Image: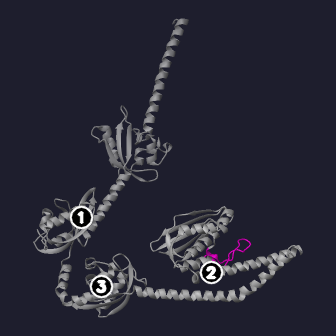
Amino acid sequence: MAEKPTYDELVKKIEQLEKKCAEYATVDDQCHRAKSVYRTFFENSGAATIIIEDDGIISFANKQFEKLFAATKNDIEGKLKWRDIVHEDDFEFIRHYHILRRIDPQAAPENYEFRMLNKLKEMKYIVNTESLIPETQKIIASLIDLTERKMAEQSLNESEAKYRALFESASDTIVLLDRQRMIDCNQKTLEMFRCTREQLLASKKETFWPEFQPDGRRTSDIIEKYFQSALNGNTTTFEIQRLRYDGSVFDAETTYTVITLSGKKYLQAIIRDITERKATEIALKEGEAKYRTLFESAIDTIILIDNETIVDCNLAALKMFGASREQLVGQKTWTFMPKFQLDGLPSKETGKEKTRQAIKGEILFLEWRFLRCNGSEFDAELTFNTIDLKGKKYFQAIIRDITERKQAAEQMKKLTQELKRSNTDLAQFAYVASHDLQEPLRMVTSFVQLLQRRYQGKLDKDADEFISYAVAGASQMQKLINDLLKYSRVDTHGENMEPTDCNTVVTHALSNLNKAIEEAKAVVNIDHLPTIQADYTQLVQLFQNLISNAIKYHGEKQPEVLIRATDKGEYWLFSVRDNGIGIKNEYFGKIFVIFQRLHNKDQYPGTGIGLSICKKIVERHNGRIWVESKPGVGSTFYFTIPK
């Protein structure tokens, strides 16, 4: 029977056990700390990182992988297998990779690409780098998202494929080259130069042009000039004589442009055979001496056309279109026409229809709209027919500018309408003012004022009130007549148009409205305004009326007014914007009619003629006025004044 340990022996053993427990606790603490560092490192790694157990289960996923897979740790860790995130078409490849990785880690590549489907079923292109955790079958995988790069590469490939399709199907010759040689060409190039692709690409560039041009210039000098200009970013077009592979000469138009393919810059040459066009020009020059004097001295514009291309024109045409002969000859006719004619029909298609009529022998007389070289449009009478010159049929267009005639007719129409409207207004005013208003008003005003002076305070309260109403009514009538007089005098008593500083005009108007502005505590902001041709007095009246209305119809808000002017090229666009009660759409036209009011005079005093006067003033200045408004938000009154 074993002896029982003594008390001291028991104490010593207990101390030994406590020491070992302390050592185990220290190791356990260090282990926890290592795990914490380990997790912090992977959580903050720039790459999406996961740990894959030997059974394929993902046991750890960091924040970057959560974002990439569009899922949370709870959805991933311990629940997803590696194969769950791999596109089915890539699964077999990755399975073999993992087998190789476990059998012979050195033989497996460090990384590989595959396609991943995240939780949202979005396709992601991934490059994956894997490492085996020592003494385990676990794998650490770092995944980098290549999707954006792949999409960019795919877009670039598609763009280049489209370019190649256009390149091969183009109707013009297209050649890609650098300084030393030709790199590529389309089928039209081979047809133009009458050689095979191998012959062309094996040849020097100089093979396809003569040493000198007909004017004595060295061809290589011409080519180098335009070549360098294109390399500097310019698109250059020029004409020279070129050589085919068999040595025959032809006239060509060449356009140089720098393009980028697969990140590399090339020079693209588009070459067009213009031999026929040149031959046509030469043929015309041979017979020119016989009719040039008559042709050039004609008052009207004369243009000769072949296959929709201008081949000749007289001096009147150059003056009419504001162009040199080089700018007209060789151009398509529709270059000098707007896209649509006055009747809304497309110029190009309508012109072709008229050409078909002329081919049948008809002489056409049309009113047609053209474009000058500076882009301005003008109306013309066009006589269009076919003529024969040296056995060849051309179209002849004789053009007469009728812009001034149409402007004169339009001005006459406008003046007639204005005179008619003015006469009507004046006749109405003369009748109302002289017969129906002025004389009765003077009598009523005199007697009610006499009653007020003589009996004010001597009769009862009702009598004083009635007399006060009569005086107020007479006063209101007087205001109506005065406003009517102002309205009628806009056209008949206006001053001459002269340079007028609109800043000074608005300052004057604000001075007249100083009391109303102070009482309403209105804020008026003014942008810098231009100097225009105008009647100073009437312009003051115009701004004063618009600003006064903006202050008057402010509702409960503090009035805020903004005055601006915008340069629109041919005219100035003025605007007066407020934050008032606004106007409904159905009243936009009514407010400019004389004596038309939207509110009773107890709410907002006035005669209802202010905006009518504004309209009259703007129309006298050959402009127009309108309003844009939203109830409860405010109104903006716009008007135009031509330059």
Point 18% across, 84% down: residue:
285
Residue tagged by mark 1? Answer: 268
Q: Residue 374: horizontal and vertical position, in percent?
A: 35, 75
Residue tagged by mark 3? Answer: 316
Q: Give the mark, 3 or 2, whose residue is nearer the N terminus.
A: 3
Colour setting: one colour
> Type of residue at label 2?
Tyr
Residue tagged by mark 2? Answer: 487
* Secondary-structure class at tag 1: strand
Point 27% across, 82% down: residue:
310
Q: Give the mark, 3 or 1, whose residue is nearer the N terminus.
A: 1
Specify whether 563 is left or right of 123. Answer: right
* 605 drawn magenta: yes
- Asked if residue 121 is positioned above or below residue 294 in the image, the reply reads above
> Type of residue at label 1?
Gln
Q: Quadrant location of residue 381?
A: bottom left
Prevalent SS, magenta region: loop
Which mark is nearer the camera, 1 or 2?
A: 2
Mark 2 is surrounded, within 10 Å at the Cα level, by few (under 14), some (14 to 19) or many (20 or more) other residues, namely many
Q: Which residues are magenta?
A: 585-610
* 444 drawn magenta: no
